[in-house]
Image (spheres, grey):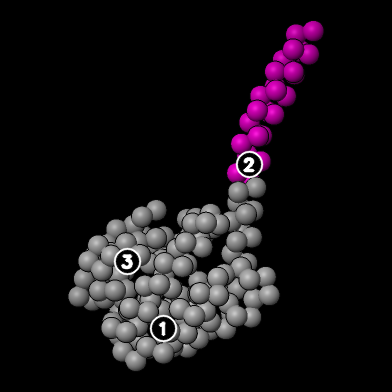
Amino acid sequence: MKLLKNSARFFLALAVAAGPLAAMAAEDKKADDALMEPVKSVLDHYLKIQGELAKDSIKGVDEDAAAISKAVKGDEMKMLSPDVATQADTLAQAKDLKAAREAFKPLSASLVKYLADNKAGVGTYHEAYCPMVKANWLQTGKAIKNPYMGKQMLSCGELKN
């Protein structure tokens, strides 16, 4: 009888513990689903752009921005807003660093919103904010690499998550 009571307690404790674990697994699955193609590709190109702007460079920015636009336009599931493609097209046409940084702001805002709305990329992508230009961006790593200020104030900003 004592063995039966202890077994029942054990299974009850196991069931109580399994509930949150199942919820976490479902949330992790949603995060993984949210980073399916073309979102993963878009973020990879976005991070290359962020890195170049942080180095005060626009080398390859036009190509990466065009790749973002192409990925969004070619997505039959319409995971990302068509605005992302338009914003990427604008960035691809930027002729200088100042124009590229201005065009990067709305693209960043759209991608930050996508990740937040879909609870995606948690722990991989960090949202950062620059109070000088009042704009956010995404980056990997926790050391601030400000694409809006570049070498002038590379570490200006704060992580938001």
Label 2, label 1: how many angstroms apart (C-alpha)? 39 Å
Query: 49 or 115: which is nearer to us?
Result: 115
Mark with earlier residue (2, 1): 2
Read off the magenta span: 1-25
Residue 128 visible here: yes
Label 3, label 1: how many angstroms apart (C-alpha)? 16 Å
Q: Is the Cβ of the residue at disc 2 closer than 8 Å to that at disc 3?
A: no
Mark 2 vs mark 3, foreground winner is 3
Q: Quarter of the image holding residue 71?
A: bottom right
Left or right of 34, for residue 60: left
Residue most extreme to the top: 1
The residue lying at 34 percent from left, 92 percent from top is 95
Task: Read off the residue under disc 1.
Answer: 91
Mark with earlier residue (3, 1): 1
2 part of magenta stretch: yes
Mark with earlier residue (2, 3): 2
Kind of residue sitting beneath label 3: Ala
**Crowding at label 2, few (<14), some or many (≥20) Cα neighbours within 10 Å?**
few
Left or right of 8, for residue 42: left
Task: Read off the residue under disc 2.
Answer: 23
For label 1, the SS is helix
Instruction: State whether residue 5 is above or below residue 45.
Output: above
Q: Position of residue 119 (x, y in %)?
A: 53, 54
Kind of residue sitting beneath label 1: Leu
The residue lying at 35 percent from left, 83 percent from top is 100
Task: Read off the residue under disc 3.
Answer: 135
Q: Position of residue 21 (x, y in %)?
A: 63, 39
